[in-house]
Amino acid sequence: MHRETHAVERIGWLRAAILGANDGIVSTASLIAGVAAAGAAQASILVTGVAGLVAGAMSMAAGEYVSVSSQGDAEKADIARERHELKTQPEFELEELTQIYEGRGLDRALAEEVAQALTAHNALDSHLRDELGLSREMRARPVQAAAASAASFSIGAALPLLVVLLDAGRSLPWTVSAASLVFLAVLGVLGAWAGNAPIARAVLRVSFWGAFAMAATIAIGSLFEAAG
């Protein structure tokens, strides 16, 4: 049996994982670069980075869970409504499905035949897929999304923290920024590969915004050092 694998089948967890890792790298590297530019000691920089990792991972998990749960609640409401309409207005629902297939290019007779066949096979799934655009692959999975976000954020945030252990000198703001841009570029490549997207565009996108964030925090940290 031939089995095709499409990027859409992993879009839910992939989006959460890429977003989490990207935020972990950018936010933690920016914190480290900003605090280091202000002249903080290595111990203070490490504490700031670890605190950022823990707080960020929890925030990502909670935010993703709430967001995807809200999506799931809306999906459940739509499913319940569609199930009720199929039970109380089957003729209307059949005509609705027929018109959908007509709109996609089938003639009336063939559209009616397809609608009747799919209704007999699984009326609810047919309406969810063709009327509402809901499929099993795209259904909301809040726990999976929250876990993917927290784990990927933690992994992403740990990378800039490793740089702090390797460079405790005045060059830290620049080394952590440079290393993090490399991490972001690798993340962009992995995300583009997993999602079958253009690699150059993905790398440019994540690198640009990461560089902007770190440059801003270094500038702010330098101002505090000068003021002190």
Image: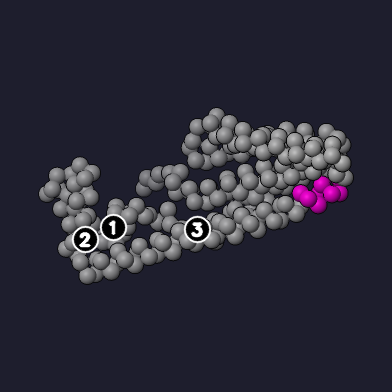
The answer to whether marks 2 and 1 mark residues whose Cβ atoms lie closer than 8 Å is: yes
What x and y, as percent, mark residue 204?
58, 31
User: The C terminus is located in which quarter?
Assistant: top right
| Residue at 60%, 60% in the rendered image | 62
Position of residue 174 relative to residue 61, above or below, is: above
Q: Which residues are magenta?
A: 42-49
Q: Answer yes or no: is residue 117 visible.
A: no
Q: Report, in whole angstroms, how far the alpha carbon at label 2 lies from the one at label 1.
A: 8 Å
Mark 2 or mark 3: whose residue is earlier in sequence: 3
Residue 93 is tagged as 2
Q: Residue furthest left?
A: 109
Front in this rendered view, residue 49 or 187: 49
Position of residue 121 relative to residue 46, above or below, is: below
Q: How dense is the environment of label 1, judged by Cα within 10 Å: few (below 14), some, or many (20 and up)?
A: many
Question: As shown in the figure, which amino acid type bears the numbered disc 2?
Answer: Glu
Q: Report, in whole angstroms, how far the alpha carbon at label 3 lies from the one at label 1.
A: 22 Å
Front in this rendered view, residue 60 or 38: 38
Front in this rendered view, residue 149 or 123: 149
Is 46 magenta? The answer is: yes
Residue 127 is tagged as 1
- What is the secondary structure assignment of the residue under circle 1? helix
Q: Residue 127 occupies which quadrant of the picture?
A: bottom left
Residue 68 is tagged as 3
Q: Residue furthest front?
A: 227
Q: Answer yes or no: is residue 106 visible.
A: yes
